[in-house]
Image (cartoon, rainbow, N blue to C red):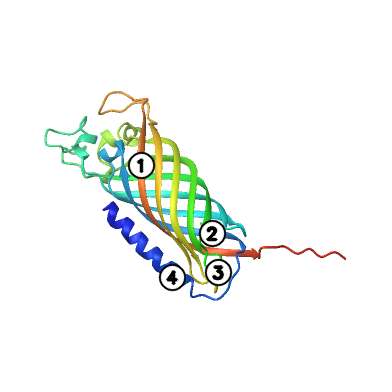
Amino acid sequence: MKIKLIHFFIGVSFFTCLSAQAQTGFESKRAWLIGIGLSTNIPSGPWTDNFRENYSLSTSLGRKFSSNIILSGEWNYLFGGEVDNRSTILEAITTSNGQLLNANGSYAQININQRGTYFNLQVEKLFFSPEKNQNSGWSLGAGAGYAWHWLNIDNVGNDSPQLIDDYVAGYDRMSRGFLATQSIGYMYLSNNKLINFKLSFEVNEIWSQDLRRYNYPSGFVSDEINLNLLYSLKLKWYLPIYLGGKTEEYYYN
């Protein structure tokens, strides 16, 4: 799956690079970049016990300089499908067949999904910009930030006392920690200012630690810091607000 995503990224980036060269001349300019993005993510590391392929939505605000250096801040919200090993997560309160009884003595309907959020500050540099569109090009970036990830436990009908209010915190495995980001991509800011996007491949390293005081299934809290990885293919759409060209002119009376 990882190889397919990388091949797809390279193919689309090569196509956008060729199309950018067909545009009319446009010098590198200073701009504010407002972005929204969608990512598909593949997790790796200890959290793969509960996390699998997932998705994230992002918003960002960046400042592009005429040198094609970009400073930006980004916030991501991570979400995913149903977690597979539900019986293991709730094993302290489930029956021998892995089911949870509700207040009426029937089997409860419980949904457990992946959730997370992280923010980071990044610096990027555009390279190999075509002469006819110097606001586009291949980008290399790096950044740092902070992340949280947990299990969203949905007690449908709210009819299971074992998972009401603060009791859920004993099972959601909320963790937090520092994050480092590296990325390679292709940014395209069109000369007519109508089509503006970036396609990138990112790697996020998250050093996370259990945030809860007590974990019900295991009976203890671990102080261990785990290194989790998140491989992301991200498509971001930009609204650029240009501030002018490479130089600024001042007039005096």
> What's the residue type where badge 2 is placed?
Ile
Alpha carbon separation for disc pair 4 and 2: 25 Å
Identify the amino acid type marked 1.
Leu
Label 4, on which residue?
18
**Residue drawn where x is 49% and y is 46% of the image:** 142
- Going by the numbered disc 3, the residue's amino acid type is Glu
Label drawn at residue 229: 1
Closer to the camera: disc 1 or disc 4?
4
Image vertical order of residue 151 relative to residue 131, above or below: above
Mark 2 or mark 1, earlier in chain: 2
Residue 28, image x, y percentages: 60, 64
Percent coordinates x, y for residue 117 in the rendering: 42, 45
SS under mark 1: strand
10 Å crowding of disc 4: few (<14), some (14-19), many (20+): few
Q: Residue furthest top?
A: 220
Mark 2 vs mark 1: in front: 1
- Asked if the residue at tag 4 contacts the one at tag 1, i.e. Cβ–Cβ closer than 8 Å, the answer is no
Mark 2 to mark 1 CA distance (whole Å): 27 Å
Question: In which quadrant will I find the C terminus?
Answer: bottom right
**Residue 120 circle label:** none
Label located before the other in sequence (3 or 1): 3
- Tag 4 secondary structure: helix
The answer to whether 182 appears left or right of 243 in the picture is: left
Residue 187 location (% of width, % of height) = 48, 62
Q: Nearer the viewer, mark 3 or mark 2?
A: 3
Foreground: disc 3 or disc 1: 3
Q: Which mark is residue 131?
A: 3
Q: Which residue is mark 2?
A: 34
What residue is at 39 percent from the left and 47 percent from the top?
203
